[in-house]
Image (spheres, helix red, strand yellow):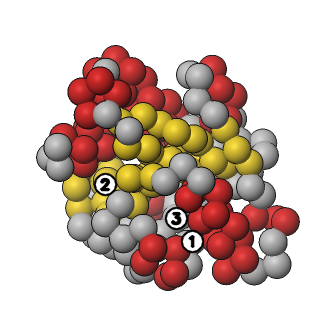
Amino acid sequence: MKNIVILISGGGSNMAAIAQTARKEGWQGKFGVRIAAVISNRPEAKGLALANALGIGTEVLSHRDFDSREAFDAALMARIEVHSPSLVVLAGFMRILTPGFVRHYAGRLLNIHPSLLPAFTGLHTHQRAIDLGCKVAGTTVHQVTAELDHGDILAQAAVPVLPGDTADLLAARVLTQEHLIYPQAVRSFFADSA
Ligand code: GRF
C-alpha cells in the first residue's frame, strides 16, 4: 500500500476534494493508494472535522509548542514518517518548511498555490492580481523545493478576473478549479509511476 499524508492548516477543502476523488475513483484498488493521515499545525483547523467525517485519521501538531522552525519540522517529520508516505501533500498548509524537511521529501512533496506561478509567489495573491488589473488569475500545483512557491509545475488552471471582483470572490472562483486540478495531479503522480 502506498500512503499519502496530507498537511493542512485551515478549511481543508482541497484535502476533502482529494479524498472524495480517491474514494470515487477507487485509488486504493487501482493504484494501491490510500490517505493514511491528515495532520494540522492548527488545532482549530476546520479541515480536521472534515477529514474525520471522511473516515481519515487526524493528528494535530501545533507549531506554537516549539521554540524553533527546525524543532517543529523535525517533530512533524517524525509524525509523518510513522506513515511511511510515498507522497506528502500540502493542502493549505500555511508554514514555510525548512530546507532539511524539503530535501527529505524531494520529489514526493506537492503544494497548491493560488496563482499562476511564477506570477505572484507568497501571500495575498488574489488582491495583488486585482490591484494590478490582471484579467486572468488561477492556481498551480507544483513540486516543493527549498525556494518558496518554486519547483516543477505539475498542473495549472486559469479563471477570469471579473469586474467588481473582491479577493474573496476571486478566491472562491479559483478554489473550484483547485478542487479539480489537485486530485488530478495527485492521481497522475501515482498513475504515471504505476
Ligand atoms: C487554497 O487556496 C490553496 O491554494 C492555498 O490555501 C487555500 C487552502 O484552502 N494554499 P483549503 O484549506 O484547501 O480549503
Q: Position of residue 105 (x, y in %)?
A: 42, 67
Q: Earlier in the sequence, mark 2 or mark 1?
A: 1
Q: Position of residue 173 (x, y in %)?
A: 39, 35
In-front residue for pair 85/150: 85
Residue 105 falls left or right of residue 44: left
User: Amino acid under label 3?
Assistant: Leu
Residue 155 falls left or right of residue 182: left
In the rendered structure, find residue 123 and report the number of the disc placed on it: 3
- Neighbour tally class for label 3: few under 14, some 14-19, many 20 plus, Cα within 10 Å: few
Which label sits in the foreground, 1 or 3?
1
Label 2 with label 3: CB-CB less than 8 Å = no
Label 1 – label 3 distance at C-alpha: 12 Å
- The residue shown at (56%, 22%) is 54
In the rendered structure, find residue 140 and report the number of the disc placed on it: 2
Viewport quadrant of the C terminus? top left
Query: In this orientation, does residue 133 appear?
Result: no
Secondary structure at badge 2 equals: strand
Residue beneath disc 1: 96
Up/down of 194 relative to 125, above or below: above
Secondary structure at badge 3 equals: loop
User: Amino acid under label 1?
Assistant: Ile
